[in-house]
Amino acid sequence: MQDTAERASQFLRSLANQDRLLLLCQLTEGERCVSDLEALTGIRQPSLSQQLGILRREGLIEPRKEGKRVFYQLADPRVTAMLQQLYDIFCTNYGEHE
């Protein structure tokens, strides 16, 4: 059980950053190139590269190179499941407690 708790904790740490969460939310809609991610999220270099690097190292996203452009897509189905839960809690009437 301790190993499972450690893996879950690491997964949650990967999501527990506003920029990374924004990037992952954009990628739930499909593959995106870096310039699109920058425009959609407002995250500027070098922070964008840093956060994409963390998500890549954690195995949550995977890159695909096409010429000089790099595209990213989700690589871990747990991300989609977790983001759906977060959406249900924070982005629906259920989650509106302000």
Image: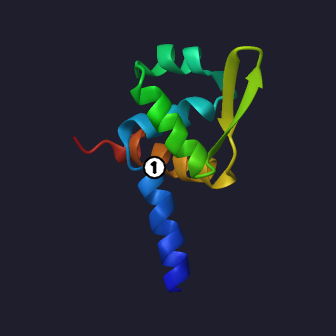
Asked if residue 22 shows in the view, the reply is no
Horizontal and vertical percent position of residue 36? 57, 15
Q: Is residue 61 above or below residue 76?
A: above
Residue extending farthest bottom: 1
Q: Is residue 51 above or below residue 75?
A: above
Q: Quadrant of residue 65?
A: top right
Query: Looking at the image, which is closer to me, 4 or 54?
Result: 54
Residue extending farthest right: 66
Query: How many marks on residues?
Result: 1
- Residue at 49% from the left image edge and 29% from the top image edge: 49
Query: Looking at the image, which is closer to me, 21 or 65?
Result: 65
Q: Is residue 82 above or below residue 32?
A: below
Horizontal and vertical percent position of residue 90? 39, 44
Horizontal and vertical percent position of residue 81? 61, 52
Helix, strand or loop at disc 1? helix
Q: Quadrant of residue 41?
A: top left
Rendered image coloring scheme: rainbow
- Residue at 42% from the left image edge and 56% from the top image edge: 13
Amino acid type at circle 1 is Leu
Horizontal and vertical percent position of residue 55? 54, 44
Quadrant that contains the C terminus: top left
Mark 1 neighbour density, 10 Å: few (under 14) some (14–19) many (20 or more): some
- Residue at 66% from the left image edge and 31% from the top image edge: 72
- Residue at 51% from the left image edge and 51% from the top image edge: 85
Asked if residue 50 shows in the view, the reply is yes
- Which residue is identified by label 1? 15
